[in-house]
Amino acid sequence: MLIDEQTITGRRVHTARLTQAKGLTDGPPGDEAIRAASIAKYRKRAAGYDRSCGPTWPIRERTIAALDLQPGQRVLDVGCGTGLSFDMLRERVGDTGRVYGIDQSPEMAQRASARIADRGWRNVTVSLSAAQHARLPEPVDAILFHYTHDILRSPAAVRLLLSLARPGATVAIAGVKYFPAWLAPLNLWVYLKNVPYNGSPGQLRAPWSVAAALLPGLRLTPTQFGMGYIATARLPQRPEAAPASTLTTS
């Protein structure tokens, strides 16, 4: 089932008190331009997108495993694209759980909706929505950010998305970053690899930094010889009393 932003906002939705602060869901001036550029890029890439994901499949598997999902849980797949993660997510939450996907690209979301229909899944839903305006009918137990660079660089989007999860929920992030200093000459190549997929392909030195400021204890694991990363954390049990942000590496 494909639900557009106008449809879902007519339902009862879950948002934490954090999102009710004036202006929180309004992105910085660059958000709309970045979204427009990203949508245009995925309009061209959607048809062949699945074929391009083979090299990062093991990272997808590791990131989903890091969520430690249990039967009956609810999970949000941010920037779900064509729904490539849905099989693994649904397998873990089972028939009694629920998988929510959101994506801003009509072409990608339509393919995700077709995947759901082909599988006959009744507990998987994809919504066509910008991350900055995402809504859910209930709080989730886990959030997956798999190669969602533009979203992760938007404070408005990250704050709102985290507010859709219950306290103590697990968060797992995977993405691209620049190589460490000793491989710095290769970073132009990293940037150019990012260009076809993102509306704003830069800011690759610490692309997790916005999330790290909101997720105390975020744990970072390098991948792809330092060109990628997986980051994991849990939302504070009491957001209003969260300790200062820390970042650990492994």
Image: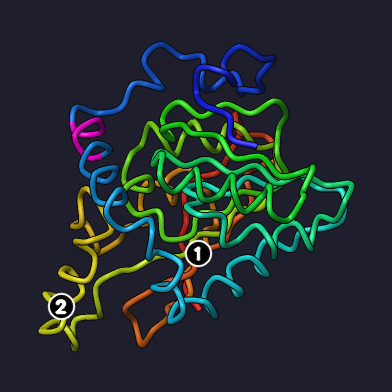
Give the CA distance from mark 1 to mark 2. 23 Å
The amino acid type of the residue labelled 2 equals Trp
Task: Provide the secondary structure element on which disc 2 rests.
Answer: helix
Where residue 52 sits: x, y (%)?
39, 73
Q: Earlier in the sequence, mark 1 or mark 2?
A: 2
Q: Which mark is residue 189?
A: 2
Q: Nearer the viewer, residue 59 or 209?
A: 59
Horizontal side, residue 149 vs residue 40: left or right: right
Residue, disc 1:
231
The amino acid type of the residue labelled 1 equals Ala
Question: From the viewer's perspective, is the residue at label 1 or at label 2 nearer?
Answer: 2
Where residue 7 sits: x, y (%)?
57, 18
The N terminus lies in quadrant = top right
Task: Provide the secondary structure element on which disc 1 rests.
Answer: strand
Residue pictured at 59% horizontal, 29% vertical: 240
Image quadrant assignment for residue 204: bottom left
Residue pictured at 49% horizontal, 31% vertical: 160
Q: Which residues are magenta?
A: 30-34
Horizontal side, residue 211 vs residue 185: left or right: right
Q: How would you classify the magenta stretch by its main secondary structure?
A: helix
What colour scheme does the image use?
rainbow
